[in-house]
Image (spheres, helix red, strand yellow):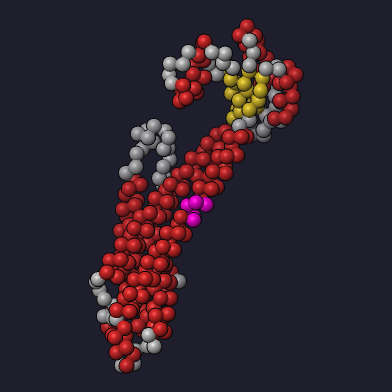
Amino acid sequence: MLRTALSLLGRGDRQADRVVPPSGHTAWLTSFTAGAMTFLAVFALALSLASGRLADRWSEALARTATVRISAPPDQMEMQTRVVLDILLSTPGIASARALTDDEQKKLLEPWFGPDLPLEALPMPRLIELTEAPEGYDGEGLRKRLAGEAPGAVLDDHTRWRRPLASAAARLRLLGIVSIALIGGTMAAMITLAANAALAANSQVIEVLRLVGAHDGYIARAFVRRFTLRAFTGALAGAAAGTLGVALLPSTDAAGGFLTGLGFTGWWWFLPLALPLIAAIVAFVATRHAALTKLRELM
């Protein structure tokens, strides 16, 4: 299919090309539709890939860390903290453990309560961050040990955070695929309408060509080539504009970390180059089907 579409783009027939109007509403409609749909497809790809990477990165970071929350009276907090740290450091599968400082806990609460939170006046629990070793640890056994030796300590292995993030990543990828499919379907529908309009407008020319011995395959190839070329040209412009727009999005530092990774990275920047070829294939299939169907109706 791709080879046939590319051969049509490269092989011209001036006599056959005269059958198809070189300008008019069908010409700009085909090019504009292909360009606009490809432009949207670039952003759909960029947002889908970036969101998936961000969710995967968050999920991976949470997968190797866990938190122990200690709730105890102020005069027992230091003792409870030392007991929990001793338990964690002696547990197989835990690489490291450390208690967060007051400043670190305050920074964790800043997005919700602002920078002027009087932490010392609140009964805040002590948080201990632990890092999991590659072989992992027995979470259920650790919970039982903490319950027996430090009743005020609660282990949070971030499972409730990882599951929604993994689910969100999968859904975002699926949403990107569905968006691309809808964009391709819309492009095919619009190109089909344009091809039908061009065929109907040139019905008398088609009749004359048939009278002089032209086969329907010859006539159909002229329409297929012209509309495939228009779609490819429009999609090429749309892909270039979309890629430029993604490249001009705010950088990681300018976005303040929230939009980290938005856009393409590495070799994914070459992915938009495939979209004009996909648009040409869509135009080839849609125009060929429309041309053969319309020619049968005009018999």
Task: Using the rendered image of the protein, determine whether residue 11 is visible from the camera's viewpoint.
Answer: no
Number of numbered discs:
0
- Indicate left or right for 80 with 44 as reference: right
Task: Using the rendered image of the protein, determine whether residue 145 is visible from the camera's viewpoint.
Answer: yes
Q: Residue at x 41, y 67 (%)?
A: 188
Where does the image place residue 239, in percent across and percent down from the top left? Answer: 34, 56
Q: Report the span colored magenta.
A: 174-178
User: In the displayed structure, would residue 275 be above or below residue 47?
Assistant: below
Front residue of 149/19: it is 19
Q: Residue at x 37, y 68 (%)?
A: 191
Where does the image place residue 276, in percent across and percent down from the top left? Answer: 37, 62
Where does the image place residue 160, in percent across and percent down from the top left? Answer: 61, 34
Residue 177 part of the magenta-drawn span? yes
Front residue of 268/53: it is 53
Residue 253 part of the magenta-drawn span? no
Q: Quadrant of the C terminus?
A: bottom left
- Indicate left or right for 267 with 100 as reference: left
Q: Main secondary structure of the magenta part?
A: helix
Q: Quadrant of the N terminus?
A: bottom left
| Residue 273 image-quadrant placement | bottom left
Where does the image place residue 9, in percent across and percent down from the top left? Answer: 34, 72
Q: Residue at x 54, y 13 (%)?
A: 122
Residue furthest toward the top?
75
Residue furthest toward the left?
23
User: In the displayed structure, would residue 74 be above or below residue 237?
Assistant: above
| Residue 99 image-quadrant placement | top right
User: In the displayed structure, would residue 97 be above or below residue 260?
Assistant: above
Q: Residue at x 24, y 71 (%)?
A: 23
